[in-house]
Image (spheres, helix red, strand yellow):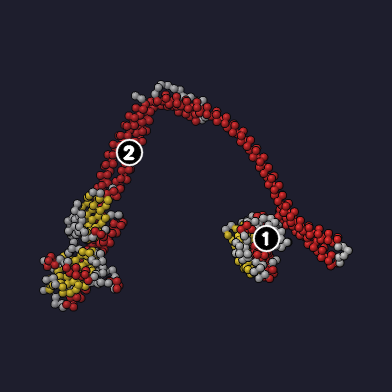
Amino acid sequence: MKLYHQLVVFVLFVTVVPLVVGMAIISAGESRLRQRLVESRRLEVAALSAGMQQWLREQLDRIARSLGMLDLKDLDTRELEGVVRIVYKSSEAVTQVAMLDGDGRPVAGPVFIEHPEKYPEYAFRVPVASEDSKLFLAKLPLDLARRSSHGSMVVGLARLCSKGVAVVPVVVPYRKEGASYLVAVELSLAELQRRVEQVAAARQWVAWVADGNGRYVVHSDESLLLKSAPGDGAVTVEAGGRRVFFRGDSLVALAGIETVGWTVGLVQQSSEALSQIRSNRAAALSLTGVMVLGLLIAGAVFTRRIAGRLTALEKGAAALGRGELTARVPVRGSDEIASLARSFNEMATQLEAARQELEQWNRQLEQKVQERTRELEIAHRRLLETSKLAAIGQLGAGVAHEINNPMVGILGNVQLMMLKNDSMDGPARMELLRKVEAAARRCREIVQNLLRFSEQDVEAEHARINLEKVLRDAYSLTAQQLEQLGIEVLWELEPGLEVMGDHRQLMRVFLNIIMNARTAMKDSGGRLTIRAGRQGDSIRVELIDTGKGMQPEVLDRVFEPFFTTKDVWTNTGLGLSVAYRIIADHGGNIEAESEPDKGSRFIVTLPVIREGERA
C-alpha cells in the first residue's frame, strides 16, 4: 500500500472515533442543561406569580379591612357615601367604588376622580372618565355576588379604561345584622403591568397574565391586552399549578395566581434559551479537538517506520538552509518519498545556479553604484559652487546698485565745486560739502549694514535678560515720534518674562519692527499693541499695528536683504533681514502676517530658559 493510502486510512480512523465520542458527550450534556433550564424558568415564573398574588391579596385585604371596621346598619345615603369614600382611600390601585343594594341598584357612588393631578394625595391614581363609570356599573358580576357569602371576593372580567389601563371589577357582599349591600370596587392593574414590562425589558422575554378565559389582562406588549391567547397551546393552569414546556421556537413557563384564578406566563425564544447549551456544545467540540490532537500524537508512532528516509530529507533541507547548495539527498525506491528526494535535488541545483547568477549581478550592481556615487558627488560640488557664485553675484549687484547712487552724488558735487571754485562764495561751498558728507555717510551705512547681515556679531553677549526691559528700551528710542504722530501704544505683557540672549541685539530687532509700524501709521495715526506671554516651551512676542498693511507679494519678500517699500533714501532694506538673523541666532523664529488696509502683525518666538541653563 502506498504511503498516501496508508495516511488516508489513518486519518479516517483518528477523526471518526473522536467525533462519535464527542457527539455522545454533547448529547448527554444538552439533555442535562435542558433539565436545568426548565427548572430555572419554573422558579422564575413561580417567583413572579407569588409577587403578583401577594400584591392582589394586599389590595383585597385593604378593602376587606376598611369594610370590616364599619357597621352599615341603618346608615342613610350621606353616611353610605362616606363609607364609599373610605373604601376608595384604602388603596392607590382603587379607581372606582360604588355601593349597591341587594338587588344591584346603586345606593351610593360611584366615587372616582377624573383629574387626579389636581389633588396631590391622589396624583398616582388612574384618571376615570364618566363613560368609564357607566361601564364599571354595567360590567359588575352581580349574579355571582348575590349568591356569595358575606366578606367573599367576586372578581369580574377585566377591561381597558379610557386611559388604556387594564382594570378589573371586584364585588364584596356585605350581609351583617340585617344590612345587605354589594360593595363594588374597580382595581387598576397598572402595577402588574409595570412588573411584567420590567421583567420583559431586563430579560428580553415576553411576559403576561391571563384570566380564566385565556384573555391577557396584563401583557408586555400592550397591543395584546384583553385579547385571547392563540389557540395552538394552553396559557392557563390550575390555581397554584406550574408548567414549563417547549412550544415551537419558544420556551413557555406558566404559574397560577391562586387568589383570582389567573395565570402568569413567561415566554423565551428557544435560540436564546439554548444559548448556554450551544456554548457548551462548542466547549465539547473543543474537547473533541483535544482528543483528536492526542490521537495525532499517537500517530507519530506510526510514522517511525518511514523516519529513516525522512531524516535524510531533513538533513538535506537543513544543509540547504545553511547555504550549502551543493548538498544532495540520496534517492531510493519509486514511491512519493523518492519523488520528493528527486525534486529536492533538482531544487538545490537550480538554487545553486541562481545564487551564482545573483553574485554576478551583485558585483555588477556594486560597480555601477560606485560609479553613480562618484558622479553625484561631482555634481553636488558643482552645484554648491554655482550657488555660491550666484549668491555672490546677487549680493554684489545689490551693493553696486546701492553704493552707486551716493557715489554719483559725491562725484557730482565735487566736480561742481571744481567748476565753480572761483565764483562760489563760502555758504554755497559749505552746502555742497554737506551734501558730499551726507553721501559719504550713506555709503558707510550701507557697507556697515551689509557686514552686519553677512557676518556673525562677535560682540554678542548672551545672558539672562528681562524681556519687558528690552521691549521698553526699544520703544523709548522712538516714543516721542510715535506720540507726535498720534499713535496709541497698548502694553499687554506677562510679568517676569526672561530669555537667554543679547540685550542690545534683541532691542535692535524690536526697534526695527516698531519703526516699520510707525511708518505704516504715519499718515492717519493708529494703535500699536505690544503683547508678550508664555506659550508652552516658548515665549511669544506680538507687535500689532493698525497701519496700511502689505500686499501679498510684499509680505513674501519682507525678510529679503535690500528689499524695502519706504520712499526715504536713507532706508537700506536690511533692517528686517538683520532682525531675522538675530532671532535665528537666539534659537527663535520671526513671522509676519498682514492684509492690505488691515494692519500687520509681527510674531517673535524665543525659547524659554531651561532649568540649569547658563549664559
Quarter of the rendering containing residue 582: bottom right
The outermost residue toward the right is 422
SS of the residue under disc 1: loop
What residue is pinned by disc 1? Answer: 565
Give residue 472's position: percent from left, percent from top: 66, 66
Which residue is more in the foreground, 253 or 337? 337
Which residue lies at the image location 28% right of the left edge and 36% below the top edge? 20
Q: Quadrant of the C terminus?
A: bottom right
Q: Residues within 10 Å of mark 2 (few under 14, many from 20)?
A: many
Q: Looking at the picture, does residue 163 appear above or below residue 452?
A: below
Quarter of the rendering containing residue 128: bottom left
Which residue is more in the foreground, 586 or 360? 360
Quarter of the rendering containing residue 296: top left
What residue is pinned by disc 2? Answer: 288
Counting residues from the start of the chain, the first of labels 1 and 2 encountered is 2
* Mark sitting on residue 601: none
SS of the residue under disc 2: helix
* Amino acid identity at mark 2: Thr
* Amino acid identity at mark 1: Thr
Residue 563 horizontal side relative to residue 92, left or right: right
Give residue 6's position: percent from left, percent from top: 34, 27
Query: Tags 1 and 2 in contact by the CB under 8 Å rule?
Result: no
Count the marks: how many? 2
